[in-house]
Amino acid sequence: MTEDLEFSRPFDISRIAPEGASETITATAEECQAIAARFGVEAVHSVSATLHIQPWKRGGFRARGEATANITQTCVVTLDPFDSVVHAQLDQIFIAKTGRLAADDVEIVVSHDEDDIGYIDDDEIELGEFAVQALCLELDPYPRKDGAELPVSSTETLAGESKANPFAVLKQLKLKNTD
């Protein structure tokens, strides 16, 4: 499973005390290159996450924290590269793949969307992939560097087209054909 991940940081759940455990993870230069390819950006200079993992219900765990990536993106207006920082708040429940938790001789079935939960695999929680997915969701799909704006003439044309009746051209053609 972890061979295919760009940034794999399995965390052994046996390290989690009743009050929880803290973990800081950082990507290597090679991992940053692979993450840049996944994100579709020019470069990823660094990725790090700080998490606090604590027991949740009986048999589950909750990981909370923040992830940060320093990246170089291409501006959609000027096509110039620019540096930016991406932040993601992390909050995830991890349960056994069976989706069952124990609670005082009662079995609780947890029903979540698959996107809302993570799974404990071989007594490990995958923190790296969790952080990368959260950061990916925070990327601006149309990044602009500070001060980048469309030229005024382009803006006027776009505004004019949005107000024009899209059928006006057809009306003109119809009038020409009737003459």
Image (cartoon, helix red, strand yellow):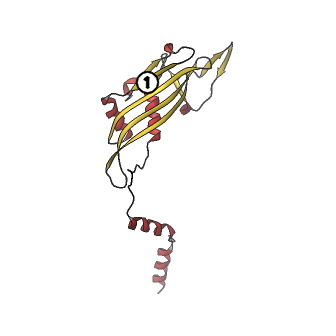
Q: Quadrant of residue 102?
A: top right
Badge 1 marks a residue whose secondary structure is strand
Which residue type does callout 1 highlight? Answer: Thr
Please indicate whether residue 166 sits to the left or right of residue 100 in the image: left
Q: Nearer the viewer, residue 110 or 62?
A: 62
Q: Quadrant of the N terminus?
A: top left
Residue 151 x, y percent position in the rendering: 37, 63
**Up-down relation of residue 157 to residue 40 (above or below):** below
Q: Residue at x 47, y 66 (%)?
A: 159
Residue 51 x, y percent position in the rendering: 49, 25
Residue 139 x, y percent position in the rendering: 43, 42
Q: Quadrant of residue 56?
A: top right
State the count of labels: 1
**Up-down relation of residue 51 to residue 133 (above or below):** above
Q: Nearer the viewer, residue 122 or 127?
A: 127
Q: Residue furthest front?
A: 147
Residue 156 x, y percent position in the rendering: 43, 68
Q: Residue at x 46, y 70 (%)?
A: 160
Q: Residue at x 43, y 27 (%)?
A: 128
Q: Which residue is mark 1?
A: 24
**Up-down relation of residue 107 to residue 64 (above or below):** above
Crowd band around label 1 with a 10 angstrom C-alpha radius: few (<14), some (14–19), many (20+): few
Q: Residue at x 37, y 37 (%)?
A: 70
